[in-house]
Amino acid sequence: MRTAGALAAFALALPAAASDFSAFGPAERAAFHAELRAAILANGDVIADAMAAPQPAQSEMQQYIQDDLTLLERLAPDLLSGHAVALFTAQDCNTCAAALKELTEITERYGLTFTQHDLHTHPAARWAAALGLDSAPFYVLPEMVLNGHMPPMVLEKHLNPKPH
């Protein structure tokens, strides 16, 4: 802890302009690196504990993922109607025709089915709003949403029931 205290004192003693470490000369940089390394090696357990603790951003992201999966599970019976994927399109969408063509080819190749929902219909608009999406195309699978026109290889990766 003495090294960590010395490092903290060293950092606090620096003038504000000197806290720009790129302004250090070679000798100052070498001394700082040596002190920092010594502090890390002397207090490795503290660093390991800090790294092992739950990360708030990661925990928050996990909650968002779980919320989305719960929502998809709730919507899937109506939205997918037993199909492998749902494609949401709109009449004013310039990539929807290509998305429809590519999805048709892929699902035929793998013996899968899909359903298409037009965002201009009430049920599709309601599902899109629940999913937080408002522009087409987007794809809904049982455990994920792919927003935007996806390249065929991305769709194949998620729809191919067999490993490549």
Image: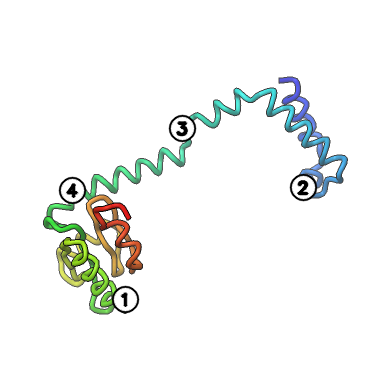
Amino acid type of the residue tagged 3 in the rendering: Pro
Q: Earlier in the sequence, mark 4 or mark 1?
A: 4
Q: Which mark is residue 95?
A: 1
Image x and y of residue 31, in percent: 83, 35
List the single residue furthest toward the front.
Answer: 164
The residue at the point 35 percent across, 68 percent down is 151
First reached walking from the N terminus: tag 1 or tag 3: 3
Total residue callouts: 4
Which residue is labeled 2 in the image? 20
Distance, label 3 to label 2, CA atoms, is 31 Å
Task: Where is residue 79? Give x, y as percent.
Answer: 16, 58
Q: CA distance from mark 4 to mark 2?
A: 52 Å
Is residue 130 in view from this perspective?
no
Amino acid type indicated by mark 1: Thr
Question: Could you tell me which quadrant the N terminus lies in?
Answer: top right
Please rate how many residues cluster around mark 2, counting C-alpha atoms within 10 Å: few if below 14, some from 14 to 19, many from 20: few
Residue at image mark 3: 54
Which badge, 4 or 2, comes first in the chain's sequence? 2
